[in-house]
Image: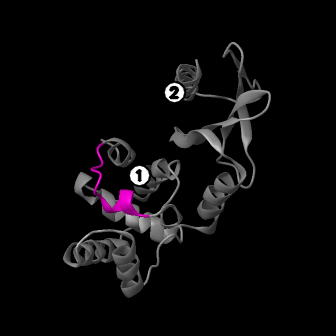
């Protein structure tokens, strides 16, 4: 099971991740970025290390402090975890930090750009080599690829009346990406109709 699937579906209500306030945690579309970063770095992570990966991600993104004492203070102030449990988590995160990849400026800029520009209808997730999400615009639900530096590439429009898809013929879209877009369309239609 992928990290994002565990974060999104199997989380218990009292996890530290769920308790963090909005300004101290990443947006939901960044969960898939964690999987991609771990996969590309070759880091071997067990399912028991999900919280450690998430905390390392939030430190790299600047939501939480990288300083050990400040991190402990932030977690104590923003969660109801016991001090001993927080210390154990922070120690594991600090041990893992030597193996967890540093985010380069380009990755942080991509995540920041998507976060600042778009309010997504469906969060951006990695499908093959594209970061795909759906945005609610006036005339249509627009499917974008967010992997380009400081710009989004339109992959398709989903008609708001009949939910038909108009593909951008200038883009090569893989079969898994097409399936993902069709599944997102179905989810939007089911939610609205």
- Is 63 in front, or is 61? 63
Q: Residue at x 40, y 68 (%)?
A: 56
* Residue 55 percent coordinates (x, y): 39, 66
Q: Which residue appears at 38% of the width and 44% of the height?
A: 8
Element under label 2? helix
Magenta stretch: includes residue 17: yes
Classify the position of the C terminus by image quarter. Answer: top right
Is residue 77 visible in the rendered image? The answer is: yes
Check whether the beta carbons of the residues at disc 2 and disc 1 lie within 8 A of each other.
no
Q: Which residue was labeled with disc 1?
A: 39
Quadrant housing residue 170 = top right
Q: Quadrant of the N terminus?
A: top left
Q: What crowding class fits label 1: few (fewer than 14 Cα within 10 Å), some (14-19), or many (20 or more)?
A: few
Q: Position of residue 152 (x, y in %)?
A: 73, 45
Q: Is residue 84 magenta?
A: no
> Which residue lies at the image location 42% right of the left edge and 50% below the top edge?
35
Cα separation, mark 2 vs mark 1, equals 18 Å
| Residues in magenta, as a range | 10-20
Q: Where 99 sits versus 73, above or below?
A: above
Q: In the image as oriented, which residue stretches furthest toward the left?
A: 84
The one nearer the camera, 174 or 87, is: 87
* Residue beneath disc 2: 176
**First reached walking from the N terminus: tag 2 or tag 1:** 1
Q: Residue furthest bottom?
A: 69
Is residue 44 visible to us here?
Answer: no
């Amino acid at each position: 099971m992928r990290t994002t699937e565990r974060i999104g579906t199997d989380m218990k209500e009292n996890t530290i991740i769920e308790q963090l306030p909005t300004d101290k945690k990443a947006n939901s579309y960044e969960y898939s970025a964690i999987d991609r970063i771990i996969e590309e770095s070759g880091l071997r992570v067990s399912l028991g290390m999900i919280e450690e990966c998430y905390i390392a991600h939030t430190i790299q993104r600047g939501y939480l402090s990288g300083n050990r004492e400040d991190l402990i203070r932030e977690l104590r102030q923003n969660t109801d975890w016991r001090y001993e449990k927080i210390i154990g988590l922070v120690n594991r995160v600090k041990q893992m930090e030597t193996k967890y990849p540093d985010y380069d400026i380009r990755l942080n800029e991509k995540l920041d750009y998507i976060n600042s520009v778009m309010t997504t209808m469906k969060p951006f997730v990695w499908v093959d080599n594209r970061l795909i999400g759906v945005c609610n615009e006036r005339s249509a639900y627009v499917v974008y690829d967010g992997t380009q530096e400081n710009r989004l590439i339109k992959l398709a429009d989903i008609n708001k009346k009949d939910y038909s898809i108009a593909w951008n013929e200038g883009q090569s879209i893989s079969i898994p990406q097409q399936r993902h877009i069709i599944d997102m369309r179905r989810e939007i239609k089911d939610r609205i109709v």
